[in-house]
Image: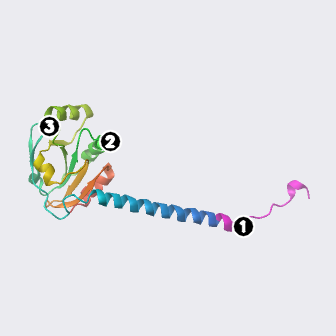
């Protein structure tokens, strides 16, 4: 037999299978740890929000286009209340997701975004125009900010069709997460 014809020793499948199993276990462990950390941080950030199951505090606020908007006018619809600020980097990063979410809402769903009380009407209008915002933007007041216990931006409240708070989240979110939570609000 020539050296090129010498049969190569067979490798056992066990080391490769063992290695693959070890990697899968490590990935599963890491994914589980990541999910735990994500949910722990989310719960910690939302600890001071208005509790689920409570009536959403009603408000009457002016929109940047001069209309008066009252939350209770949307009974029968699921509403996402998105509290934000123009100076908030995370809030700015969510603008595209909010436009996309708004464009995909059903007739029984509404997105109301509420700017921090430190934003003037002129600044709000300029920001909306400059960034191509297509959804309703309301100007907050200190009593609304206090009623919703806002400590940081962005903060989302998901209100069900009966006007009860279904859930609250603090921090960055994306269109899919916001849309899913809104659709789950009962």
Residue found 15% across the figure and 61% down from its top: 164
> What residue is pinned by disc 3?
64
Left or right of 164, for residue 153: right
Image quarter for residue 47?
A: bottom left
- Name the quadrant of the C terminus: bottom left
Q: Residue 112, position in %: x, y?
A: 18, 47
> What residue is pinned by disc 2?
93
Image quarter for residue 180?
A: bottom left
Residue found 66% across the figure and 63% down from its top: 16
Image quarter for residue 62?
A: top left
Upstream in sequence: badge 3 or badge 2: 3
Assess whether residue 15 is covered by the magenta stretch: yes
Q: Residue furthest right?
A: 1
Relative depth, front residue between 120 and 76: 120
Residue found 25% across the figure and 31% down from its top: 130
Upstream in sequence: badge 1 or badge 2: 1
Residue interval drawn in magenta: 1-16
| Residue neighbourhood size for the residue with mark 1, other residues' Cα within 10 Å, grouped as few (<14), some (14–19), many (≥20) | few
Q: Residue 145, position in %: x, y?
A: 15, 49
| Residue neighbourhood size for the residue with mark 3, other residues' Cα within 10 Å, grouped as few (<14), some (14–19), many (≥20) | many
**SS state under label 1:** loop
Assess whether residue 101 is covered by the magenta stretch: no
């Amino acid at each position: 037999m020539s050296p090129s014809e010498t049969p190569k020793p067979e490798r056992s499948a066990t080391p490769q299978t063992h290695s693959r199993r070890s990697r899968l276990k490590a990935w599963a462990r890491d994914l589980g740890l990541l999910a735990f950390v994500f949910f722990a941080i989310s719960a910690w950030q939302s600890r001071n929000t208005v509790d689920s199951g409570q009536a959403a505090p009603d408000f009457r606020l002016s929109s940047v286009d001069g209309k008066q908007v009252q939350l209770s006018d949307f009974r029968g619809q699921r509403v996402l209340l998105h509290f934000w600020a123009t100076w908030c980097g995370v809030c700015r990063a969510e603008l595209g997701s909010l436009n996309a979410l708004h464009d995909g809402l059903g007739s029984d769903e509404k997105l109301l975004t509420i700017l921090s009380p430190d934003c003037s009407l002129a600044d709000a209008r300029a920001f909306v125009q400059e960034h191509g915002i297509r959804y309703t933007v309301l100007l907050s007041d200190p009593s609304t900010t206090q009623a919703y216990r806002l400590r940081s931006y962005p903060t989302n409240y998901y209100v069900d069709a009966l006007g009860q708070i279904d859930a609250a989240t603090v921090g960055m979110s994306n269109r899919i997460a916001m849309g899913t939570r809104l659709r789950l609000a009962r």
